[in-house]
Image (spheres, rainbow, N blue to C red):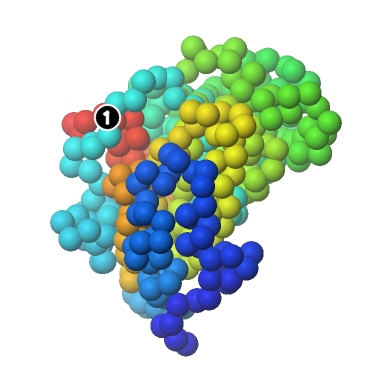
Amino acid sequence: MTDSPPSSDALEGQGESQVDAWSTSPVPSVSGDAPPVGSPAAASPMSDGALVGPSQEPAADPVLDQPASAPAVGADRADADPMEGPVTSTRVRPPLPRIIAVANQKGGVGKTTTAVNLGACLADLGYRTLVVDLDPQGNASTGLGINIRSLQASMYDVILNDVPIADCVEASSVRNLFVAPASLDLAGAEIELVPAFSRELRLKQALAEVRDDYDYVLIDCPPSLGLLTINGMAAATEVLVPIQCEYYALEGLGQLLRNVGLVQKNLNPTLDVSTIVLVMYDARTKLAAQVVDEVRKHFGEKVCHQVIPRSVRLSEAPSFGQPIITFDPRSRGALAYRLLGKEVAGDAEA
Ligand SMILES: Nc1ncnc2c1ncn2[C@@H]1O[C@H](COP(=O)(O)OP(=O)(O)OP(=O)(O)O)[C@@H](O)[C@H]1O
Ligand SMILES: [Mg+2]
């Protein structure tokens, strides 16, 4: 075991350093908050040993789902605990409707959990919210109680067969929260779309018809940078990137940002990587606090103050087809996503 930094090859996975990846234009909406290219700070996340190796394992003491009031170890800023959330929201209330693509091509980083639970919290705040499931795995749909085996219409039909999205939208158990479900056949869409006319803009065209029906549309993208994710980004006004507070958390982020840049350049000039959410924060590890620090250093105000804890209850909720705010309203995960909802919406704390 060693504390020395992992090689940049290992981190980027493509023989390219993370620093180069982050510095590569065009990613104007992101680089605005990042340190200047070539500055010492810009070189920090991978080159200064910030992401330490696996020697820093969680302590043996299991504190998963500790009470919300419990202090977290390793605060991300001198003056704030990453688990506390904002005292008051620092974000201005953006104009509605907002269409937010939840994207990160890394698998299992909390995209669906964030789309479902942030969606539920925004709906609970009174915003009419639609979760669009763009992932053939259909996890956002099942996580909101939809049986994806008995769908009359799904996002496959919307993307491939020009079925109006309103025809596939289903209500969820949460007031104001709706879902446009996906089923397994959406997996074929990546290939079937290739020869299709305006293949990157299918979702954008579909959402144009319901734009005035919702305050928030959250698009749960699949773990790839293929045509479905491109459709999500082309249709969105913003991108929200969940980042796991774990080893290798930043792997592939450069590629994601480059793709956002390509979508900006070619399809959606006003697309903005507006929001970075740190998820699966484990207060027992120094590593989690270090990842929080590094991500904040690079992305500044784009990173939400509210951090989502690693919580067993959050991982259990989908199998009951419920978001955390109905499954276990008093859990730490529910509280964290509620605060995140307020922060993202720019609603001042009550
Ligand atoms: N904060 C959390 N605490 C504990 N478990 C979590 C948390 N967030 C997500 N999980 C669990 O981690 C797994 C991956 O999460 P999720 O499905 O949201 O990731 P994803 O990025 O959508 O994955 P994929 O790339 O496969 O679509 C799931 O089992 C989920 O229940
Ligand atoms: Mg998912």
Furthest residue toward left: 79
Residue 134 percent across, percent down from the top left: 64, 35
Name which quarter of the figure residue 216 lies in.
top left
**Drawn side of residue 79 relative to residue 295, left or right:** left
Element type at mark 1: loop
Q: Looking at this view, is 49 or 222 the one in front?
A: 49
Furthest residue toward bottom: 1
**Drawn side of residue 175 relative to residue 185, left or right:** left
Q: Vertically, is 104 above or below 214? A: below
> Residue 201: in sight, yes or no?
yes
Residue 181 percent across, percent down from the top left: 64, 30
> Residue 326: in sight, yes or no?
no
Residue tagged 1: 92
**Drawn side of residue 269 relative to residue 301, left or right:** right
Q: Vertically, is 58 above or below 233? A: below
Q: Residue at x 53, y 76 (%)?
A: 7
Q: Residue at x 45, y 41 (%)?
A: 28
Q: Residue at x 27, y 54 (%)?
A: 83
Q: Quadrant of the C terminus?
A: top left
Q: Vertically, is 18 above or below 274? A: below
Crowd band around label 1 with a 10 angstrom C-alpha radius: few (<14), some (14–19), many (20+): few
Residue 70 percent across, percent down from the top left: 22, 59
Q: Residue at x 25, y 66 (%)?
A: 73
Residue 59 percent across, percent down from the top left: 36, 77
Under mark 1, the amino acid is Val
